[in-house]
């Protein structure tokens, strides 16, 4: 039976960040990933001739310190690429008509009478205990929220964001120090997934892909991890870095209290469709993204910030209630293209957390329960969904485990 210092379940940013920190501290690590690919929600779709586009996460910022540590240590300092001018242009699609905006021009979309009526009281109101909807509809008015702000906020987590907490864990807004020497927003020469692939090659980490973990039990030197097919792996320490809905069943046997708490984290499924078109078949002006008002998708993110002379790519993120046929039909309709125009088509389904008010208290309870154990829990359902929230959580969890 194989024995390691640490077994990490899940090969997304969270699992890789934790595995890398443990390996850097001289621990022997095994990382088990269900999919044949590392990265999870970080998914760079690669096509012919070295072209790629992001089907999942697309942007990193110079405020992503823990993620930058991982990227730099994985040898990708020189692969950082600043996002080009298209990053500052975006579209709002309402009733079939797209309006092309820039950050200041988006303000012109607001109904100013409604905003003026709400702003004075809204500015004085407390932010504590508010959701995105309760805060911003109080600040700008409900109609402004529904017509303008709400769709942009929902585009960030690819789900209705109205019930997200305004502040604290689970919030979409975080103030973090910016790291000098890196562009404000950036990607990587071969896509974000190149960071995950490189991190997986860190010395001291044994990566097994296409391996589903089916059980986690106290036993042996600390933990026994069971994988599909009946094999078991022993490790002194263990880390679960899988979405909340996958973590809860694994915890149920030996950590029932933790399982019950993690099961309380709401989740949302995101169905993504990515397509590549010849540049001459695209009608949209170059832009970072298109956000619809009240549609079957939450956003269409382009690769335009990293322009290519002959191709353009678009990743649409849909509600889970749509069928595959409906998604493809809507993609073609929005792009005004036919199936024959597509140079490449890719699809993905991921589960994201849907944090609600009280998420901070739930995370604090999970952490209290976790403190006396040699088990780490990490992922995007603690601090927030951003890549940096995941990398930062993993950093703190490894510090706790290695103490
Ligand atoms: C469409 C989209 C766009 C986004 N855009 C951005 C962005 O621009 N910037 C940003 O900062 N963030 C963005 N995010 C959020 C961010 O990408 C994710 O929150 C983050 O990557 C999650 O990482 P994770 O490792 O916690 O989880 P995941 O990426 O979900 O990884 C978990 C891994 O665990 C594996 N797994 C699950 N169960 C098992 C099991 N039983 N055994 C073994 N393995 C298992 C899964 O296969 C998966 O690979 C975006 C997310 C999405 C979906």
Image: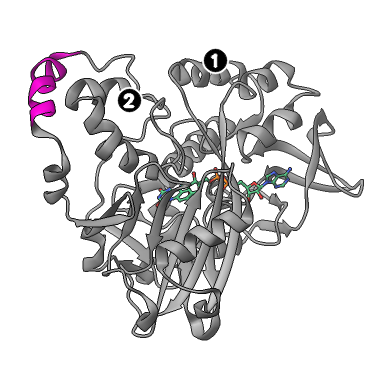
Residue 388 screen position, x and y as percent: 41, 44
Of circles 2 and 1, the one toward us is 2
Q: Give the range drawn in magenta.
A: 113-125
Considering every residue shown, the one lying at the far right of the view is: 230
On screen, residue 95 versus residue 347, left or right, reads: left
Mark 2 CB within 8 Å of ligand 1: no
Mark 1 CB within 8 Å of ligand 1: no
* Position above or below: 244 against 86: above
* Near-viewer residue (402 or 308): 308
Applied colour scheme: one colour
Which is more N-terminal, label 1 or label 2? Answer: 2
Spatial CA span between label 2 and label 1: 26 Å
Question: Would you identify the image quadrant in which residue 71 lies?
Answer: bottom left
Q: Does the magenta stretch include residue 123?
A: yes
Q: 10 Å neighbourhood of mark 1: few (<14), some, or many (≥20)? A: some
* Near-viewer residue (281 or 402): 281
On screen, residue 246 versus residue 331, left or right, reads: right
* Position above or below: 396 against 297: above
Question: Would you identify the image quadrant in which residue 136 lies?
Answer: top left
On screen, residue 84 versus residue 55, left or right, reads: left
- Name the main secondary structure of what is drawn in magenta: helix
Residue 387 screen position, x and y as percent: 44, 47
Mark number displayed over residue 133: 2
Helix, strand, or loop for circle 1? helix
* Near-viewer residue (307 or 326): 326
Whether residue 31 is visible, yes or no, is: yes
Residue, x 59% and y 32% (percent of image)?
A: 401
Residue, x 74% and y 57% (percent of image)?
A: 208
- Which quarter of the rendered picture does the C terminus lie within? top right
Residue 225 screen position, x and y as percent: 80, 39
């Amino acid at each position: 039976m194989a024995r390691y210092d640490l077994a990490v379940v899940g090969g997304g940013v969270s699992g890789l960040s934790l595995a890398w920190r443990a390996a850097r501290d001289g621990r022997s690590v095994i990382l088990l990933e269900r999919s044949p690919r590392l990265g999870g929600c970080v998914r760079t779709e690669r096509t012919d001739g070295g072209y790629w586009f992001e089907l999942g996460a697309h942007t990193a910022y110079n405020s992503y310190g823990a993620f930058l540590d991982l990227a730099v240590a994985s040898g990708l300092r020189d692969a950082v690429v600043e996002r080009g001018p298209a990053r500052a242009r975006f579209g709002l699609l309402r009733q079939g008509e797209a309006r092309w905006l820039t950050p200041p021009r988006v303000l012109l979309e607001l109904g100013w009478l409604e905003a003026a009526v709400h702003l004075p009281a809204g500015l004085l109101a407390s932010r504590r205990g508010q959701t995105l909807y309760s805060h911003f509809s109080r600040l700008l008015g409900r109609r402004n929220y529904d017509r303008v702000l709400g769709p942009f906020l929902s585009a960030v987590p690819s789900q209705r964001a109205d019930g997200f907490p305004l502040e604290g864990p689970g919030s979409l807004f975080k103030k973090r120090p910016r790291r000098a020497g890196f562009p404000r927003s950036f990607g990587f020469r071969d896509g974000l997934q190149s960071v995950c692939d490189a991190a997986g090659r860190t010395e001291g980490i044994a990566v097994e892909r296409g391996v589903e973990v089916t059980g986690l039990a106290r036993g042996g030197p600390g933990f026994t991890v069971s994988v599909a097919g009946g094999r078991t792996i022993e490790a002194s320490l263990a880390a679960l870095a899988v979405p909340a809905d996958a973590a809860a069943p694994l915890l149920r046997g030996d950590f029932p209290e933790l399982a019950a708490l993690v099961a309380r984290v709401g989740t949302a499924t995101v169905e993504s469709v990515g397509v590549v078109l010849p540049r001459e078949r695209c009608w949209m002006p170059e832009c970072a993204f298109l956000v619809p008002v009240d549609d079957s998708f939450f956003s269409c993110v382009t690769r335009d910030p990293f322009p290519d002379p002959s191709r353009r790519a678009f990743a649409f993120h849909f509600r889970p209630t749509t069928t595959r046929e409906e998604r493809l039909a809507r993609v073609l309709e929005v792009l005004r293209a036919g199936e024959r125009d597509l140079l490449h088509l890719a699809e993905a389904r991921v589960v994201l957390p849907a944090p609600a008010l009280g998420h901070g208290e739930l995370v604090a309870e999970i952490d209290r329960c976790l403190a006396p154990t040699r088990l780490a829990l990490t992922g995007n359902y603690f601090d927030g969904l951003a890549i940096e929230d995941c990398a930062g959580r993993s950093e703190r969890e490894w510090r706790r485990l290695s103490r």
